[in-house]
Image (tube, helix red, strand yellow):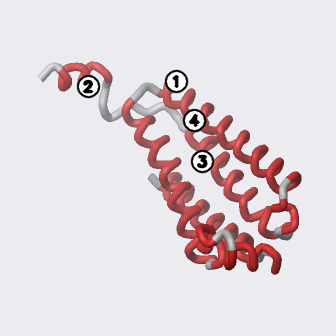
Amino acid sequence: MKKSTSLLLFQALLSVVSGILITQMSLLGRIGIHTMYRQFMIFRSWWKTALLLFAVQCLVIGLLWGIRKMVHLSAAKKVAWLLLIVGIAGFAATYWDFSTTMHKVMKAKFHFGFYLFWIGWWVSCLYFITIKNEEPMVKSEELEEKSHY
């Protein structure tokens, strides 16, 4: 339990740092968000951005934890590897977007905020990949028995 608390605290810290960096966008980015892309107004407030990023990280951790408790370790690790690959692809897509579209004028701090989000995603996945063997709380036979009722 202590390790998962440390993971959540790490993700909270990373989300705050990411939120602060994302809000330090360029003047052109601020004008664009204020005038044309109002759906991204959340990125102008550091605490709202941090809360959003932390919520997504908590969803990833909750998903991995729930899967880990329901299935055997090998299957749970496969899901964690799959989500790690999704995180790597997300990082690559973010880098590509920031280097080829108009987002490249948004300042490096803005970019680093999103890169930190993906690095946090990787850390969560790697945590569940390296977790030691524990018995799942619900065994598949128990799930099958309950579904017959």
Q: Residue at x 79, y 62 (%)?
A: 111
For mark 4, what is the residue?
80
Q: Residues within 10 Å of mark 3 (few under 14, many from 20)?
A: many
**In what element is the residue under mark 3?**
helix
Amino acid under label 4? Ala
Between the residue at mark 1 and the residue at mark 4, the CA separation in whole angstroms equals 10 Å
Q: Nearer the viewer, residue 111 or 85?
A: 111
Between the residue at mark 2 and the residue at mark 4, the CA separation in whole angstroms equals 22 Å
Where does residue 38 sit, x and y in percent of width and height? Answer: 62, 72
**In what element is the residue under mark 2?**
helix
Amino acid under label 2? Leu
Amino acid under label 3? Ser
For mark 3, what is the residue?
124
Which mark is first along the chain, 4 or 2?
4
Query: Height in image: 136 above or below 105?
Result: above
Which mark is first along the chain, 4 or 1?
1
Q: Residue at x 16, y 19 (%)?
A: 148
Which mark is first along the chain, 2 or 3?
3
